[in-house]
């Protein structure tokens, strides 16, 4: 049985769909940085930041996943770092953080929380 907070969080958005969208978006961000399309990369990075605000809330309401809450906050910070690097034209730093974001995202939560 789901915890009451988890049921509430699921009513707000489809978690699995959001995670699929996140996976696609971080790949798009990496591709757009490579193509030097900073406007699109920045817009999609902002969407990633917003997505991880939802993820943070989802796991906070769940109540038994402090590590997932911390990871979601870390990804929000990574998104801010990417946006900052893009804003100052530092594509190498943006690419490095985006690459780290992608690798960490797959490793941190998926192993423990993917089959919700």
Image: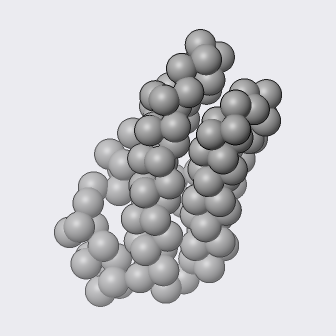
Residue name at image x 46 percent, y 65 percent: 53
Inspect this view and state whether residue 19 appears: no
Camera-side residue: 64 or 61? 61
Residue name at image x 40 percent, y 65 percent: 54
Q: How many marks can you see?
A: 0
Tell me where residue 3 appears, x and y as whole percent: 35, 84
Residue name at image x 60 percent, y 50 percent: 79
Tell me where residue 29 appears, x and y as whole percent: 55, 30
Tell me where residue 14 appears, x and y as whole percent: 27, 55
| Left or right: where 79 falls relative to 95 | left
Camera-side residue: 33 or 106? 33
Tell me where residue 31 sits by quadrant.
top right
In the picture, the quarter occupied by the C terminus is bottom left
Tell me where residue 57 sits by quadrant.
bottom left
Give the colour scheme shown.
Answer: one colour
Compared to residue 57, the image places residue 96 above or below, namely above
Tell me where residue 25 appears, x and y as whole percent: 47, 34
Residue name at image x 61 percent, y 17 percent: 36
| Left or right: where 60 falls relative to 33 | left
Residue at the left extreme?
A: 11
Compared to residue 38, the image places residue 68 above or below, namely below
| Left or right: where 89 falls relative to 29 | right
Camera-side residue: 34 or 24? 34
| Left or right: where 101 falls relative to 5 | right
In the picture, the quarter occupied by the N terminus is bottom left
């Amino acid at each position: 049985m789901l915890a009451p907070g988890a049921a509430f969080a699921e009513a707000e958005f489809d978690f699995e769909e959001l995670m699929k969208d996140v996976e696609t978006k971080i790949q798009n961000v990496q591709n757009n940085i490579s193509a030097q399309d900073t406007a699109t990369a920045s817009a999609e990075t902002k969407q990633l930041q917003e997505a991880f605000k939802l993820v943070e809330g989802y796991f906070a309401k769940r109540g038994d996943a402090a590590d997932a809450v911390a990871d979601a906050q870390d990804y929000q910070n990574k998104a801010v770092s990417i946006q900052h690097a893009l804003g100052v034209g530092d594509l190498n730093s943006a690419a490095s953080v985006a690459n780290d974001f992608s690798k960490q995202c797959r490793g941190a939560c998926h192993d423990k929380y993917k089959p919700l």
